[in-house]
Amino acid sequence: MKTLPSAVHGILIHGPGTPSFEEGLVSVLGKAPHELLKPALPFSVIIENQTDRTVAFLGVRFDMISPRAQQYSVVHYADALRNPAKAELKPGVKRFICAEPEYTALVIRGDVAAQTRGRMNLDNLRKMLQIKASVDCAVFADGRFDGPDSRNAFDRLTTERITEEALVTELERLCDCPDAEPGAMLVRAVQDPDNRARRSAARKLLEGYEAGGREEALIRARNFRYRTAVWR
């Protein structure tokens, strides 16, 4: 697997077979890699934060060419924008990312065997004629967005925040109106087939409404944890 130079200043990407990858792997794991992880190493990278700011959102892109010469690409995201203080990729920290996300999760949770689907996907990666990895985007803890952003994560994050803010505002208005039915509104939002962000936020607020009525719904609305607003 090849790696492309990072388009985000200060965020480095190290590919397998390089001294920086080997050093980074030990740094991430605190030890030599476990046998469970070794099959995934040829399809993995180490991301290193050499900036003086915490990275709260990261996108790593893998471009692949199949045995039939078809081109595929996927971007794996790590998102801590709802609580940047707990983001793991702080200054000087390194992170392991595999083209098969089950092995990234294996590192995060410890030495637990990958699921069958993850192992099967790893077999598919072995058949690829070519795999290239690159840093697609990074968002720092203050919301600063950088990178080529091939999957329009900036627009998605912005739109989702606007959607959540609108839902919370609507709920607060309905809860303050004695004749309104905030519960019915939340049920409709949970069932919205076209807006995943609205469904997800409504589900959290509906749990509060069902547990404690308007009062609990208002508490959850006023304490709703938005992602940090992104900017360029």
Image (spheres, helix red, strand yellow):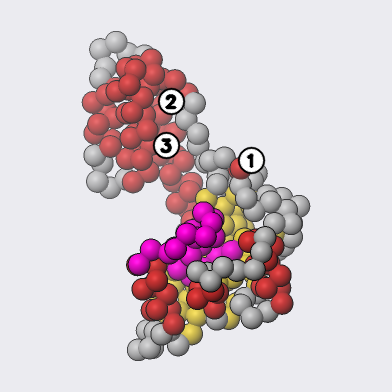
The residue lying toward the viewer, choosing from 109 and 70, is 109
Residue 50 picture location, percent across and down: 74, 60
Queried whether the magenta region covers residue 24, the answer comes back as: no
Instruction: Tell me the residue that label 2 is attached to.
Output: 221
CB under 8 Å between discs 1 and 3: no
The residue lying toward the viewer, choosing from 152 and 4, is 4
Q: Amino acid at mark 3?
A: Glu
Q: Amino acid at mark 1?
A: Ala
Residue at horizontal 45 percent and vertical 88 percent from the top = 129
- Give whichever of discs 2 and 1 has the lower sequence position: 1
In this view, 119 is above or below 95:
below
Q: Is residue 90 left or right of residue 96?
A: right
Question: Which element carries disc 3, helix, strand or loop?
Answer: helix
Instruction: Tell me the residue that label 3 is attached to.
Output: 164
Question: Which element carries disc 2, helix, strand or loop?
Answer: helix
Neighbours of disc 1 within 10 Å: few (<14), some (14-19), many (20+) = few
Residue 225 picture location, percent across and down: 50, 34
The residue lying toward the viewer, choosing from 226 and 2, is 2
Figure disc tally = 3
Residue at horizontal 32 percent and vertical 40 percent from the top = 199
Q: Is residue 189 left or right of residue 63?
A: left
Q: Which residues are magenta?
A: 96-116
- Give whichever of discs 2 and 3 has the lower sequence position: 3
- Give whichever of discs 1 and 3 has the lower sequence position: 1
Question: Which element carries disc 1, helix, strand or loop?
Answer: helix
